[in-house]
Amino acid sequence: MIFVCYPKCTTCQKARKWLEENQVTYEERHIKENNPTIEELKDWHKKSDLPLKKFFNTSGMLYREMKLKEKLPTMSEEEQYRLLASDGMLVKRPILIGDDFVLVGFKEADWKAALGIE
């Protein structure tokens, strides 16, 4: 399992603590130092069953500075993938990637269900 996070993000810290408390083995990946590629993003998007917009960090400074709220609706999927792959700070986190699922953001109930934890 891959845990994609930004160490300074409090939600990521909470998710990491939750993974450790539940003894989930994972490989950690720093999103700023090792940004997802377009291919990875396409794969994760497909596995997640989420709209692509959910992969954007809408509360991030960069998202606001770039006025993406206005721009995203008119962008093609390919343009959105390129944008997400250009800077890890645009990508919502944490992301937990398993063999057959991708979870974006930390919602404990979703993570429990995906990992079969009661």
Image (cartoon, grey):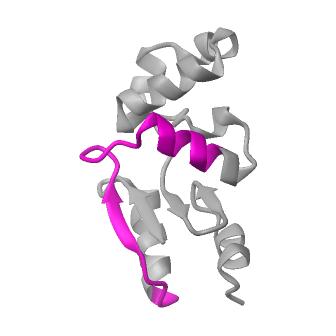
Q: In the picture, residue 42 is in which quadrant? A: top right
Q: Pick whichever, 15 or 98, lies toward us.
A: 98
Seen at 37% across and 38% down, the residue is 88
Expressed as whole percent of the image width and height from the top left, the position of residue 33 reads 24, 46
Seen at 66% across and 34% down, the residue is 52
* The C terminus sits in image quarter: bottom right
Expressed as whole percent of the image width and height from the top left, the position of residue 104 reads 59, 53
**Is residue 36 highlighted in magenta?**
yes
Q: Residue furthest front?
A: 39
- Does 55 appear above or below 94? above
Q: In the picture, residue 79 is in which quadrant? A: top right
- Does 69 appear above or below 35? above
Write the start and end of the magenta stretch as one range.
21-45
Q: In the picture, residue 60 is in which quadrant? A: top left
Seen at 64% across and 23% down, the residue is 77
Q: Pick whichever, 17 or 117, lies toward us.
A: 117
Expressed as whole percent of the image width and height from the top left, the position of residue 16 reads 42, 72
Seen at 68% across and 46% down, the residue is 46
